[in-house]
Amino acid sequence: MSTTATKTTTKNKGSKIDIHVITFAPMLAVIAFGLMYVEFSIPIMPSFLKFDFSDMPALLGSFAYGPLCGVFISLIKNLLHLPFSSTSGIGELANFLVAAMFVVPAGWFYKARKTKKRAFFGAMLGSCLAGILSLPVNFFIVYPFYYNFMPKETVISLYQAILPVVSNIFSCLLIFNVPFTIVKFVIATIITMFIYKPLSPILKGRATNM
């Protein structure tokens, strides 16, 4: 094949991928936004910690189109939610920062070598990093906002109703929020690993070996 033909083939392939990104990335963001409202409480956690599956579309996009696409989907999801925010955008900012920390390692590891093992490792790493990041994000950004409406002692008492030994916000976040965040992303990872392969031909217009 000549050099010109090779360049033409590469260009056409790139255009095809771009079309799929332009088409499906916003669609995944809208799905993620919708999934934000499919939430539920966990009995062993304070009732205001809600579990949802809204990070799965961003992880799908990160696997299919790269980590930046996963970040884009997380960003658009939270921008769509902004008009309905009850936290003046603070909750959306926190959600975006933590979700981005989750999808970037997952997408980066999978993009470097597209195997199921690397995808899973990257997502597990992202889950742990996101859990760690949730601690300073909640401690310095989210919870200080909540103190404007609810005294810090009241917030702590909600944790103490489950585990009386916690005595300050830092320990509450470390014992409850960090594991909650990690488990949330681990579950999103496991489900995504099962659905990615069937969805990949639709997302990318071709089959995948993952």
Image: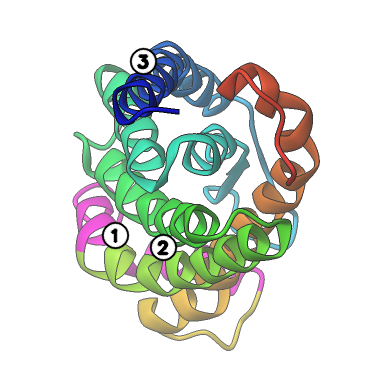
Disc 1 to disc 2: CB gap under 8 Å: yes
- Image quadrant holding the N terminus, namely top left
The one of 167 and 180 positioned closer to us in this rendering? 180
Q: Please name which of the two marks, 1 or 2, marks the residue nearer to the observer.
A: 1
Predominant secondary structure, magenta span: helix
Residue 53 % position (x, y): 62, 37
Q: Earlier in the sequence, mark 1 or mark 2?
A: 1
Q: Earlier in the sequence, mark 2 or mark 3?
A: 3
- Identify whether 151 is placed above or below 29: below
Three-letter code, disc 3: Ile
Disc 2 to disc 3: CB gap under 8 Å: no
The one of 109 and 128 positioned closer to us in this rendering? 109
Label 2 Cα neighbours within 10 Å, binned few <14 / some 14-19 / many ≥20 = some
Span of residues in magenta: 141-162
Could you say whether the residue bearing mark 3 is in a helix, strand or loop? helix
- The residue that appears at 67% across and 61% down in the rendered structure is 120
Residue of label 1: 143
Q: Is residue 189 left or right of residue 147?
A: right
* Quarter of the figure with residue 69: top left
Residue 65 % position (x, y): 45, 35
Label 3 Cα neighbours within 10 Å, binned few <14 / some 14-19 / many ≥20 = few
* Quarter of the figure with residue 176: bottom right
The residue positioned farthest toward the front in the image shown: 2
Residue of label 2: 155
- The residue that appears at 63% across and 64% down in the rendered structure is 118
How far, Cα to Cα, is label 1 from label 2? 9 Å
- The residue that appears at 19% across and 34% down in the rendered structure is 88
Q: Please name which of the two marks, 2 or 3, marks the residue nearer to the observer.
A: 3
Residue of label 3: 22
Could you say whether the residue bearing mark 1 is in a helix, strand or loop? helix
